[in-house]
Image (tube, rainbow, N blue to C red):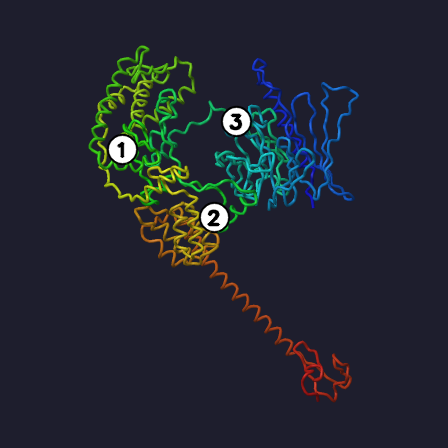
Amino acid sequence: MAADSGPAAAAAAAAAAAAAAAAVRQADRSSPALDKPAPRPAVTTSTANATTTASAAAAPAKPVRLAVAVKSIASAAKLLVYSVAPSVGFAAGQPAATLLAQVPLGEPVQAMVWVGSGLFLQHAVSYSLLQPGGRLSRIAEHGCASPRMAATPWAAGPGGPTSGGGGSGGGGGGSAAALLFQDSLLLLTDGSGAVVPGSEPIAVSEPPLALAASGPHLVAVAEAEGAVLVYERASARLVQRIFWAHDDPWVAAARHMPVAEDAAGGGGVALATSDAVMLLLPVAADVQELRCEDALQALEEAGPAVFPPDQLLPLFPQLARRWLPGLASRPLWGLHGSLQSLERICEDFLELRNSTASSPRPSPSPPSSLRGLTPPSPLSLQPPEAADPAALPHPHPHPHRTHHHAHHQHHHHHHHHQQQQQHHYHGAQGAAARLLSQHQGPGPGPHGEALPAGVSPPGSTAGGGTGGGGGGGGELAALAAEAKRHVVAYWMRTRGSPGVASLEAVDTVLAHLLVELGEAAQLEAFLGTPVAPAAPSPPAAQVSPRDAALVSALEGAGRCPAVSGSPAAPLLLREAVQLRCRLADHAGALAALALALGDVEGAIGYCRAHCGQEGWLGLLELLLRPGDGREPNYMAACRVLAAEGAALAPLQVLEALGDDMPLHLAHETLRRMVGSVLHRKRQGQVMRALHRAQNLALRCELAELQAARVVVSEETVCRGCQRPLSTRVFYRFPSGVVLCARCARPDGETG
């Protein structure tokens, strides 16, 4: 059964025209002086009369490969690969197309896409790969009702994803294919059918209507959410959600939306419906919205123990270049082994999703929710001061035993460290004073470094402070100055906090920024206010030689870096949920999902799959009374009350809510719950009245039938055996039918 191809074919043509127009605009914007290559044709796919075609572009003035998959009623499916000669640069007598290969297929082809020299084929139940030489191999079964695939650029070297558009580009770049598995998992595979190294699986909430690539991003159209979702291919992170409802019955019936990419490499994507074509273009960097307040608010919620302020130094490479090599990275704990086959990845993903019954949509948990979940462990021995090489004047000769040595030195030399801090801040005051005395003319700054160009005097006006670059910065310079002000405010607030490492680099860069922005008042406060005294350190934990040897072995093998305050990774919490589920500890699994991970949807799905009414009440109790100083999550509690399939009695819910629950939050949910009870009560009353009326009607009809008289004469015969009833025992039924005793009661005695 196939949908009407008329509107879909028109929409596909409109999408291709839009992509071609975008390519022409991109070519017009390219300058001949830059010696940019001409835009290449885009990869196209069209369908008509059970024939699928796909073309892949090569370099200019070279033949173009054309793949055609044909399936007729009489013959089996086959794939034809042609070499199409261009119209320029070849002899007129040369044939326009030359057959390169003819490959028989076991099943029809739904879609095709070129990835490098290989051709990916999409079948009804699996994906296949046609490699050079006519070798056809099956990759894996996709298990999708609506499979999707798209070609994406990917850098082959260690540089990561390409930043260009639809072409692979040069400089070691290549292509990859994004394949949909199990209707909710996107995997990136290279031209040989293996998983691309360094890529992460992308979890989607539903099978996308369309899938396309836009530079380093992947664009998917979700019908249920009514939005266009933009994912970052390298990290599998959802970076943007653009709300757009197509409202097209043809697209909804076909479960497919025609899509075309910008052949010029500009990153544009054209989405076509039966009556409109939408063009999705990347926003230029100079007009993007700068959300400094939201970013710094997230950092403040995370706290300095999770994200130290010194990690902001890479934002200012010119000022902090001497300290950047010495910054210690803070990776999270994780269990990420080497990628297996595509089938193994799909099986692991389905097992994890089905065991926790969580929604496959990615739900990133903020770092603040992970705080306090991991008890103090002797494996986290490195203090914050050990991240700076200058804070360790006598490094240990063995790097893999540094943590034990630093912990011992921190316990015995705490007073000496306070004296070093006082000396360091007196030196920082002198450095900032030299900045104030030397900012008017070029000269060496603190520690022998020259001040950056465009530094404005601190006594200048606010307008002069932001336009230190000579007035040529424009909006971009104003945005940069605003971002620097937010960073300065964040550093000033966190300066001297107990969990912040006292680094010379932070104070020096802060002095540079204050002078550059012309903030005289803040610079005066920075110079005159000493840093807050450090909080007294807790007593040192007793570390056994066995633990120290274990840490040394793990660090030496490069298995796990021991970092201070390392939070528990969400993946480990998911594994803990699986373990508690198999142990039938549903309360612990719900606590890990709702409190530790903050995945309320996952907890609701877990209750639907494994719990009854007690589980729903326990989840509601966890959200309303989490304990350990946590605030109640009333919005999540209302979400549990309104969940579909929740087995909750209204009286028990009212008892569990408590007196401190804001009624305006749960008013709508409780109104629906009480209203549903009243509705069921009224429905029962109506049903009983209907049954009573039906019973009375049947009794009235029976009385009327019984009141009717039946006359039996000598000529009256039995309706069953057609024998006279004059000398026989007969029965009269309520409907007026008269039968003899033999026909009325065949198993009884006859008269």
Residue at label 3?
Answer: 163
Q: Residue furthest top?
A: 441
- At horizontal 51% and vertical 47% (from top left) the residue drawn is 348
Residue 389 sits in which quadrant? Answer: top left
- At horizontal 41% and vertical 58% (from top left) the residue drawn is 614
State the CA–CA distance, disc 3 to disc 2: 33 Å
Judging from the image, what secondary structure is the residue with disc 2 in?
loop
Judged by depth in the image, the label closer to the viewer, 1 or 2, is 1
Residue 301 in view in this figure: no
State the CA–CA distance, disc 1 to disc 2: 38 Å
**Residue 472, percent from left and from top:** 42, 14
Amino acid residing under circle 2: Ser
Q: Is residue 170 left or right of residue 402?
A: right
Amino acid residing under circle 1: Ser
Residue at label 1?
Answer: 497
**Residue 28, percent from left and from top:** 60, 18
Q: In front here: 747 or 291?
A: 291
Residue at label 2?
Answer: 358
Q: Earlier in the sequence, mark 3 or mark 2?
A: 3
Q: Earlier in the sequence, mark 1 or mark 2?
A: 2
Q: In front here: 411 or 67?
A: 411
Q: Residue furthest front?
A: 397
Label 2 environment density (alpha carbons within 10 Å; few <14, some 14–19, many ≥20): many
Label 3 environment density (alpha carbons within 10 Å; few <14, some 14–19, many ≥20): some
Amino acid residing under circle 3: Ser
